[in-house]
Amino acid sequence: MRHTRNHRHSRTEISIEVPAQCQFKGSNAFEVTKDLDNEKMTALDHLKLFKKFTEDKAKNIFRKKMLYKRLPILTWLPKYTKEDAIGDLVAGFTVGLTVIPQALAYSGIAGLPPNYGLYGSFLGCFIYIFLGSSKDVPMGPTAIASLLTFQTAKGVWQRAVLLSFLTGIIELLMGLFNLGFLIDFVSGPVSSGFTSAVSLIILTSQVKDILGVRSSGTTFVQAWISIIEDIHNIRLWDTALGLACIAILLLMRQMVNLKLGDEKKQNLFVKILNKFVWLLATARNAVLVITFGAIGAYLYSIGDRSLKMIGYVPAGLPTFQLPPFSIPGDVISRNQTEGEHAELKGESFTEMVSNMGSGLIVVPLIALLENIATCKAFSHGKPVDATQELIAIGTANIANSFAQGYPGSGALARGAVNNASGVRTQLGNLYTGTIVILALLYLTPYFYYIPKATLAAIIIAAVIFTVEYRVIKPMWRSKRTDLIPGLSTFIACLVLPLELGILVGIGINVVFILYHAARPKLRLEFMVTDNGHKYLVLTPDRCIIFPSVEFVRNEINKQGLKSTLPVVIDCSHIYGADFTAAKVISTLVDDFGSRKQKIFFYNLKPHVSSVFEGAKIDLKIFYNFDELENAIAEMPEDSDSLEKVSIPDRISEENEFEDNKSNKSDKPKQVLNLPKFPSTGEISEIKNSPRNSPGVHRSANIDKVISSNVQPSSANNSQPSSPKSELNRKIRELYKKIDPEAPTNSSNLNNDTK
C-alpha cells in the first residue's frame, strides 16, 4: 500500500512504502503502528496474552534493574562516604528531637494515649531505609494522619492499630499493581482545600487544651459548639501558658535564618555560635518540652496542680504482636481527646472494619498524597516514583501495626527539618528511630510532667502555616472555575467528616472532567475547492464517546440544516470511539441521507473506523485532501446540496476586503453571500486563517484559494475595482510575465508588495 501527500506550493511528492499489516495513525505525523484492532481474537488468545504478561512480570521481578529499583538502598549504600555518615548523624539527631514532642502531641489528635505516637515513630523509620526513594522523608505519625485516625477509629487503640495494618496492606497492593496514578485524581485546588480545612480542624482540636476545657465531636462545627458550651470552665493558667508557648515558638522560628556577623569575616567562635542558634531554633519543640516539663515537675513537687499534665506514659518498648483483629467485650478504652474511660462492647473483625467505613480508602490515599508532596518538595525537579513510595510506606505501616503504632507517612515539616539539617541519605532515619527507642526506654517517667498546653502550642504553631490561603489569588487570576472544587472541598471538610469531605471534592472534580468530555468543542470552517465549490468543515477537538456523542450529533445536524452545503467531518483529533458513538454516527449519516445532503469523513483513524464498521455504517472516508475535494467537485451540478462560487464573485470579495481595509471607497460592492454561522458556547467562530498542515488542509480565506491559472477580465467583474485592487491585478499580470510558475494568490502578492 502506498500513501502519497502532495504539497500545494512546492509540488513535491512524498511516497512511503507501508507494509500491509500497518497503517498510519495521526494526521500530521508518520507513526507506523500495527493495527491489532482488526484482528479477531478468541478467548484463548486473550488467555495466552495474560499468561505471557504474568510470565514477563515474574521475570522482571528478579532482574537486576528491577531489584535496584525496588531496593533503593542497593544504589546509594555502595557509594556511602564519611561525609554522608556525618550529615546523616546530625540530621537524624535533630529530627529525633523534633519527633518526640510531636509524637506525644499527635497522639492527642488521634484520641490515643501519648505512648502510641512514640510506638509508631521508630519501626517505620527502619523499614524506610531499605525501601524509601527519598532521603528527606522521616516516617512517622503526622497531623493529618492523626486526625483521620481519630475520625476513623474514634479513639479506640485497637481500631487504630488495625487501621495501620489494613492501610499498609492497601498501600502495598496499590504499589504492586502500579496504582500510584490515583493521586492524579486529587487536583491542586482539592488538595489545597483539604489541607487548609484539616489545619483548621487540628487547630480547633488543640484549643481545648489551651483553654483547659472539654471538647467532643468529630467535625469542625461540632468541636467549636462543645468548646463554647464548656467555656465557663476555662483554666487561666493553662491558657496563659499555652499562649506564651505559641509566642515563644513563633519567635524561635524566626531564629532559623538569624546570622551573626559578616559571613565572609566570621571567626571560629561566631561560626559555632551561629550553629548553636540554628540548632536551638530547629529543635525548638524539644527545648520547649524540656523547659516547661521541668517547670511542671517543680510545680508538681510542691503540690501545685494549676496545670494539666499529660499523665502516665508506660515505660519500655511496646509488645511486638499481631495487630488486634477483634475487641473483647471486657476491654476498658481511654479516649484521650475526651479524657474519659469507657467500656467497649466486643467487636469482631468484620464489625471493626465496618466501623472504619470509607476511612479505609481515604487514609491510604491521603498518606500517599502527603508523602509524595514531601518527596517533591525536596527533589529539585527530579521525578518521584509513586509506586515505590507506596511500597515503602505500606510496608512501614504494616510493621508499625506489629508494634502497636497507628498509620503514618512522611511529614512535610519534619522533611524540611531533615533537609535543612543536611541529611545525605535515607540512613538518617536510623538515628531518628534510635533516639525514639532511647526515649521510650529511659525518658517516659519524665513525660508525666509535660503540660498539655505546651504540646497543644507545638501543634498550633506548626499548623497555622499550612493553611493555603495564598493560592486563592493566583487561582482567581488563572482559572476561576478551579475555585469551585477547592472551596467546596474546604467547606465540606469543615462540615462533614474528613473522609466524606475529600470525596465530595474529588466528586466535583470528576463532574467537571465529565462535563468537558460530554461537551467537546467543534471548530467550524467554511471552505472552497479550486473550482469554486463551497463546503463546510466541522472539527471535533476530542474523542467521540457515549457522554458526548448526542451533543456532537445535534450540533452537526444544526449546522447542516442551516445550509445545503456538503459537510466534512475532520476526524484528526478523534482517537477513540465506542459502540454508542457508532450507533449515533449511523443515525447522523441517515439524517443527512434523508435530506440528500452529502457528509464526508476525513482522516478517520483506522481503529476508530473499525468500530464504526462493526455497526455496519456506510461512511465516505478520505485520507487525502485532494481526493476529498475532487469528490466534492464531482458531485452533480444540479444537486441541491452543491453551491458554486464564480471567479468574479471571488474577485469581488477580494476587492471588498481591500477596500474595507483602506476605507477609501464608498461605492456599493458585490459581496459573496456566505452562510453566517452564529458562535455558540461550544462552537468556535469561522476561522479565516490557514489550517495547521499546509498542503493538506486548505485555507478558509476566499482570496487565498484562487487558482493561479485563471485570470479574470474586467468584463467579468460586475463592479468597478478600487485603485488598490487594480494595482494588485496589474502586479499579478507582471508576475505572470516574469515567472509563469509564480503563485498569484492574494496572500503572497500582498507580502511581496510590502
Image: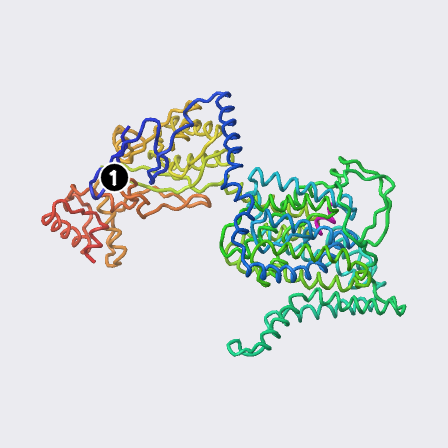
Residue 729 shown in magenta: no
Q: Which residue is mark 1?
A: 645
Magenta part, dominant SS: helix
Give the residue type that dot 1 points to: Val
Vertical placement of 453 versus 603: above or below?
A: below
Residue 208 appears in which quarter of the rendering?
bottom right
Q: Quadrant location of residue 712?
A: top left
Residue at the spot x=49%, y=55% of the render? 381
Picture quadrant where residue 398 is located:
top right
- What x and y, as percent, mark residue 498? 69, 48
Image spot of residue 721 (x, y percent): 19, 51
Q: Which residues are magenta?
A: 146-152
**Apparent side of residue 553 relative to residue 123 in the rendered image (left or right):** left
Query: Looking at the image, which is closer to me, 158 or 669?
Result: 158
Label 1 crowd bin: few (<14), some (14–19), many (20+), radius 10 Å:
some
* As drawn, 138 above or below 542: below
> In front: 737, or 531?
737
